[in-house]
């Protein structure tokens, strides 16, 4: 608020009225649900929850909208532990636990049901009138506040996260009400296509396009990939700013502008179509999960040391490749599509995302209190994690080279970018229309094996600066597999357009 309406003679009255009015809104909301037996538990519940929300909004400049609720609920315990910090404990203690204790200890007296009803009506009327008075007195300010500074409302704690939770739950009901839709029933692979395709599609995590030296970053962050003949698309954009949005979105036929989670999850995605056309589809996951995309194809999580052979402080992305040859050898017929979902640069604990030998840029930010680290330390930690992704992708290419009897190719694209302290923003997840480019401009890399003569790398190189997005992934995967279906749009296929 103070950034948009700085303290001073002109704004002070309005700022006071906002504090007054907002307090009134919270009283109105609570008075609807607070009664003799619910008042203490509810207030304690909201104090605790709001102290968490306050911490995340203050520390990372993020807002708790419905997709953030989705992120929080789909985050596993390991990722939550990454967010634990002293500052969080202080926030929750002083803004959550201590006030809750006071609420708990406060003695309340209640009148008869009749007296209580009268009191409630009085409270409600007085609060409503005082809100209206505040708005009326500063009506000029309020019209600009509601019309031109819409995002400010997203920072209202607790009302906005309550609203977002309602929106999220509404979405779940909508999703349940939708009938699951089969698409691309006519998908087939031409009989004369005798070559066997082996495509590895790597879904990256939290990588920024401008941090790849392939795209011109001044630091050498792609020392291994630069030795390969490949195409780095420099103008590639994500569907959303979070894993929960971008991952289902890129596999769905819906474009970013038409994408809704409920719709996408109630419709078959490109993996379903490929599977029906006879492609062997396998999803290996070293991230949280496939966000519903791989529900109907073979899936294995690599977060556990019992399955992933390469684990130190955490299980590494390269572990997904160790036993992959066996899968290829077992599947003697048909094309193969393997999706590798990376841990990548998942924040805020970037320093945990690579083994010690990749700590090339130092000193490194070794805390999840990102705002406590210098810009240099934060960038170093993040760039070291990019170095590790460079190594991982080079291993994927090496694996494909060993399988050169196939028409082999790798396609890598990150799910979204990241804010690293620019304008006080950290992490990701802002709604698209206020998200900075760093959260949506993602790296995308394509490597083609020697049997891909018909799609020569030179023609792809000519397109490397064209504007592409996650919208293209659905059609490009169909194109790679040479699957014909009515839902395939050649113009959206990066290989063909
Ligand atoms: Zn992500």
Image: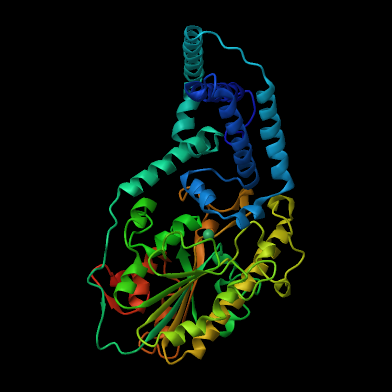
Q: Between residues 335 and 21, which one lies in front from this camera angle? A: 335
Q: Which quadrant would the C terminus be assigned to in this image?
A: bottom left
Q: What percent of the width, then of the height, locates residue 151? A: 50, 39
**Is any atom of residue 430 visible in this view?**
no
Who's the residue at 67% across and 59% down the image?
349
Who's the residue at 48% across and 49% down the image?
70
Q: Quadrant of residue 494?
A: bottom left
Q: Quadrant of residue 95?
A: top right
Q: Between residues 181 and 13, which one lies in front from this camera angle? A: 181
Q: What percent of the width, then of the height, locates residue 133? A: 49, 15
**Is any atom of residue 322 visible in this view?**
yes
Q: Is residue 488 above or below residue 158?
A: below
Who's the residue at 71% across and 42% down the image?
89
Q: What percent of the width, then of the height, locates residue 214? A: 56, 75
Residue furthest to the right = 363
Q: Is residue 199 above or below residue 144?
A: below
Q: Is residue 342 above or below residue 95?
A: below
Q: Quadrant of residue 207?
A: bottom right
Q: What percent of the width, then of the height, locates residue 92? A: 68, 38
């Amino acid at each position: 608020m103070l950034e948009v309406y700085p303290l001073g003679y002109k704004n002070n009255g309005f700022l006071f009225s906002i504090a007054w009015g907002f307090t009134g809104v919270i009283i109105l909301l609570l008075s609807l649900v607070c009664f003799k037996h619910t008042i203490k538990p509810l207030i304690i519940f909201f104090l605790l929850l709001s102290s968490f929300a306050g911490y995340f909004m203050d520390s990372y400049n993020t807002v708790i909208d419905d997709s953030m609720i989705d992120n929080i609920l789909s985050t596993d315990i390991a990722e939550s532990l990454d967010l634990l910090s002293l500052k969080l404990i202080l926030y929750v203690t002083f803004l959550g636990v201590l006030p809750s204790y006071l609420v708990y200890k406060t003695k309340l007296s209640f009148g008869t049901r009749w007296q209580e009803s009268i009191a409630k009506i009085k409270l409600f009327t007085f609060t409503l009138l005082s809100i209206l008075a505040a708005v009326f007195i500063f009506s000029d300010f309020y019209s600009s506040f509601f019309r031109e500074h819409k995002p400010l409302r997203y920072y209202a704690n607790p009302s906005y996260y309550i609203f977002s939770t309602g929106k999220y739950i509404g979405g779940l009901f909508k999703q349940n009400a939708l009938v699951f839709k089969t698409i691309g029933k006519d998908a087939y692979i031409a009989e004369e296509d005798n070559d066997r395709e082996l495509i590895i599609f790597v879904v990256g995590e939290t990588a920024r396009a401008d941090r790849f030296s392939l795209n011109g970053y001044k630091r050498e962050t792609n020392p291994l990939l630069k030795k390969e003949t490949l195409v780095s698309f420099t103008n590639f954009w994500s569907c959303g700013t979070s894993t929960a949005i971008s991952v289902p979105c890129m596999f769905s036929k819906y474009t970013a502008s038409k994408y809704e989670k409920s719709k996408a999850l109630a419709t078959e995605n490109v993996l379903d179509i490929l599977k029906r056309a006879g492609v062997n589809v396998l999803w290996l996951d070293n991230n949280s999960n496939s966000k519903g995309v791989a529900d109907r194809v073979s899936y294995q999580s690599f977060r556990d040391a019992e399955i992933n052979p390469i684990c130190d402080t955490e299980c590494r992305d390269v572990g997904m490749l160790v036993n992959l040859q066996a899968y290829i050898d077992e599947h003697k017929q048909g094309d193969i599509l393997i999706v590798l979902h990376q841990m990548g640069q998942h924040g805020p604990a970037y320093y945990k995302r690579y083994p010690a030998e990749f700590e090339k840029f130092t000193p490194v930010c070794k805390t999840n209190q990102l705002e406590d680290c210098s810009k240099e330390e934060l960038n170093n930690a993040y760039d070291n994690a990019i170095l590790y992704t460079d190594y991982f992708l080079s291993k994927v290419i090496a694996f494909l080279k060993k399988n050169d009897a196939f028409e082999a190719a790798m396609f890598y694209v990150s799910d979204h970018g990241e804010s690293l302290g620019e304008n006080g923003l950290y992490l990701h997840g802002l709604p698209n229309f206020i998200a900075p480019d760093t959260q949506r401009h993602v790296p995308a890399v394509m490597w083609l094996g020697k049997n891909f003569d018909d799609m020569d790398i030179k023609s792809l190189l000519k397109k490397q600066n064209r504007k592409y997005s996650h919208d293209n992934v659905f059609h490009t995967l169909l194109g790679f597999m040479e699957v014909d279906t009515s839902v395939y749009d050649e113009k959206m296929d990066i290989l063909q357009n």
